Amino acid sequence: MKKLFKKGLWENHPIFKQLLGMCPTLAVTTSAINGLSMGLAVIFVLNFSSGVVSLIRKFIPPQVRIAVYTIIIATFVTLADLFLKAFFPSISKALGPYVPLIVVNCIILGRAEAFASKNPPKLALLDSLGMSLGFLWGLVLLGSLRELLGAGTIFGVKVLGDFFEKWVVMVLPAGAFLVLGFLVGIMNYIERKRR
Amino acid sequence: MRDLFLIFLSAVLVNNFVLTYFLGICPFLGVSSSYEQAVGMGLAVTFVMSLASSICWIFYHLILVKFGLLILEYVVFILVIASLVQMVEMFIRKYSPSLYQSLGIYLPLITTNCAILGLVLFMVIRDYNFIQSVVFGFSSGLGFSLVLVMMAGIREELKFSDIPQALKGAGITLITAGILALAFMGFSGLISS
């Protein structure tokens, strides 16, 4: 049970190991706070959709399963989007179209298809919780690094003094690819050392 | 006419879907290892994008807005895209088996390609009219194909270079994409808005 939960946190990490859900990962991590809010939105959507898919897994005809999963996911994404719009308009604006784009986030459909559709709700929730928390820390790490290098702050708090020449490119799209590329490399390196 | 040309230029070069909006990264990383596959995927995406933008425009403006059903926006879009991909697949299989042979395996993958949904969402946010939407869809697909094919060319070369062990695979691909994105930043002065 514990192993299942841990899988998403490191071993099978959605971002660094499986390279899933790349568009939100790269697009919204211009700052730590954006990464955190996207991570929370994904936690909500992934856990609820995994739970629902697992609950009704015996009633879904296999031919139309992907369409059914997509509708379930789209429903929860609509909820998350409306919630953000109503209570956190500034975050909703910063994340822009990437909130509705959670619908096509491959992590969520991937978990529904690979795990939730074959396992009882308890296991499915454990799995989705691990995966979504793994996704969250990946986003926060990436966001913090880019914010630190690009603006000298983390969560808006100044960390590096005025001596630091800001690497503006890090908050631009190119920086996202570079930082993630090196992070994936570092994760591989750590993994190889541990073996 | 001028605004259409600007939309075209912006979608292909300046605000390229892959390199500035990070849409369609999954096929970009997955399919770009060989040149032929990249061309096939690019063609399929361009085709579906041009259709999706026009059909979703019709659905959005003539049904959703008219009857005040905006809350169903995302559900409707994803259903339209999924069924569109399915229909295109059946149509091509029936009428052009040779094209189906070359596009076949890529078509089902397109449904979960975030670039298509992203395209439709941008179209709604920017409030394009019908013709603008069609041009936007077509040129976004073209931009996607351009970058995909470029990346495939670079990756074929990468196979023969000496890369640090830990960076092999995904790491070096992402870094290459980053450098490509830096190069594309050079286009940003092309349109001053």
Image (cartoon, rainbow, N blue to C red):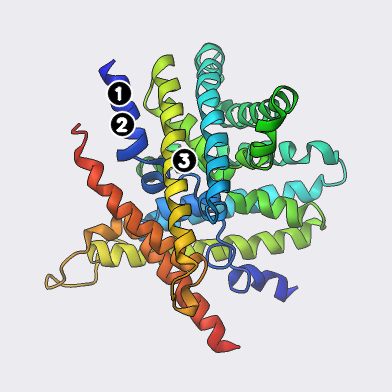
Q: Give the residue drawn at x 74%, y 56%.
A: A114
Check the picture and name the quadrant holding the C terminus of chain A: bottom right
Where does the image place residue A193, in percent across and percent down from the top left?
53, 88
Question: Which residue is tagged 2?
Answer: B9
Query: Callout 3: helix, strand or loop?
Result: helix
Question: Which residue is tagged 1?
Answer: B5
Check the picture and name the quadrant holding the N terminus of chain A: bottom right
Q: Looking at the image, tell me whether mark 2 or mark 3 is earlier in sequence order.
A: 2
Where does the image place residue B142, in percent across and percent down from the top left?
44, 34
Q: Which chain carries label 1?
A: B
Q: Give the residue drawn at x 30%, y 39%.
A: B14
Compared to A41, does A160 lie above or below? below
Q: In which quarter of the image is residue B123?
A: top left
Question: Which residue is tagged 3?
Answer: B145
Q: Can residue A80 be seen in this view?
A: no
Q: Looking at the image, tell me whether mark 3 or mark 1 is earlier in sequence order.
A: 1
- Amino acid at the residue labelled 2: Leu
Q: Which of B178 and B62 is in front in this view?
A: B178
- In the picture, measured across the screen, residue A162 lies left or right of residue A15, that is left
Q: Mark 3 lies on which chain?
A: B
Q: Which of B108 and B148 is in front in this view?
A: B148
Dot 2: few (<14), some (14–19), or many (≥20) neighbours within 10 Å? many
Where does the image place residue B66, in percent across and percent down from the top left?
52, 11
